[in-house]
Amino acid sequence: MPKLSIIIPCYFNEENIPITKERLLKNELLFDDDVTFEYVMVDDGSKDNTLEELVKFRNEQPGKVKVIKLAGNVGSYNAILAGMNYATGDCCSVIAADLQDPPELMVKMYAHWKNGIKLIVGNRADREESFFQKAFSNTYHKLIQKFALKNIPDGGFDYVFFDKQLKNEVVKINEKNTNTLYLLAWLNYEMVCIPYTRQKREVGKSRWTLQKKIKLFIDSFISFSYAPLKFISITGIMLGFIAFMYSLAIIILKFTGNIEPTGWSSMMVVILFVSSFQMIGLGIIGEYVWRNLEASRNRPIYVVDKIIE
């Protein structure tokens, strides 16, 4: 009897949980009778009544729901990693608690898994969001696709279905400051993509702030690509070449007596431009060095306050 573990990170989702649990239980009817379900609900340090709603769900479905309460907020991707660590199914799925991703798509993912595919992703072909949200997301995924993970689909993904073998690999990697779901793609197993339209959030307020999006953008690049370091090297070479040509031109003008090189303003522009590039370069290198320091400290990515089974 195959067991499916559904991992759901929860952060300020007290209004969503009552609706989400009903939809998830209805979704079970779409599967074969021999499939058993496990819901791993991870409370990512919520300060509302999310935990109470999760405990209600657990009491209504004893033996099926596992509630993992983290000591503090560590971000959705770290909460997903915590859920993976406690999931016991033959296959797993990660879905958001706000129902922007359709649970009904899971049965198609399961069918691919039965046919031997170990990673199935629901990729966002479209999304019911504002122009700026779409623009930011599409730019992020195109850059990641071009410079880091070439095998991710257009539009990216947050909704995944994967074999326990992949789950074990990601748990073993235990990487800080990364996109946990994209680590599944990084493993390079055969992947099947199922496009869908991401729905607009109807209940509650999203806590996915611009600051968190920018951090994810930086983390993803540093985790999966050395393109920022290559950018520094290439730009440095170009600036060095320009400086050499400029110096050569000044020397020629000086000795030919045609023009006496002057210009305090232009010199300051050059100095400020080069200095700003140096600061940007140091910042990028500093991000890589900081993450090495984080890894060497070996502090836990998350701390579990309690487990309610």
Image: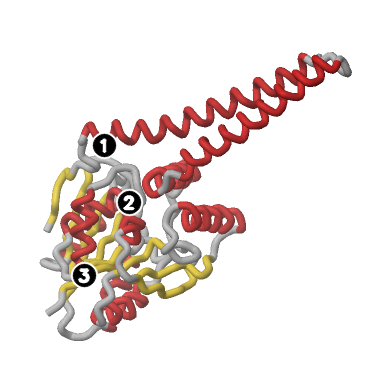
Q: Residue at x 65, y 22 (%)?
A: 272
Q: Which label sits in the foreground, 1 or 2? A: 1
Query: From what the image shows, is residue 155 above or below residue 291?
Result: below
The quadrant in which residue 285 appears is top left
Callout 1 touching callout 3 (CB < 8 Å): no
Name the one closer to the observer, 256 or 67: 256
User: Where does label 2 land, which residue?
Assistant: 77
Badge 1 amino acid: Ala
Is residue 26 visible in the rendered image? The answer is no
Q: Residue furthest bottom?
A: 33
Question: Left or right of 107: which side holds 220?
Answer: right
> What secondary structure is found at the residue carrying circle 3?
strand
Query: From what the image shows, is residue 293 above or below residue 34?
Result: above
Badge 2 amino acid: Tyr
The image shows residue 289 at horizontal and vertical percentages of: 36, 31
Which mark is drawn over residue 222?
Answer: none
The image shows residue 64 at horizontal and vertical percentages of: 15, 68
For the N terminus, the image quarter is bottom left
| Label 2: few (<14), some (14–19) or many (≥20) C-alpha neighbours in 10 Å | some
| Label 3: few (<14), some (14–19) or many (≥20) C-alpha neighbours in 10 Å | many
User: Where does label 3 land, which residue?
Assistant: 91
User: Where does label 1 land, which residue?
Assistant: 295
The image shows residue 283 at horizontal and vertical percentages of: 47, 30
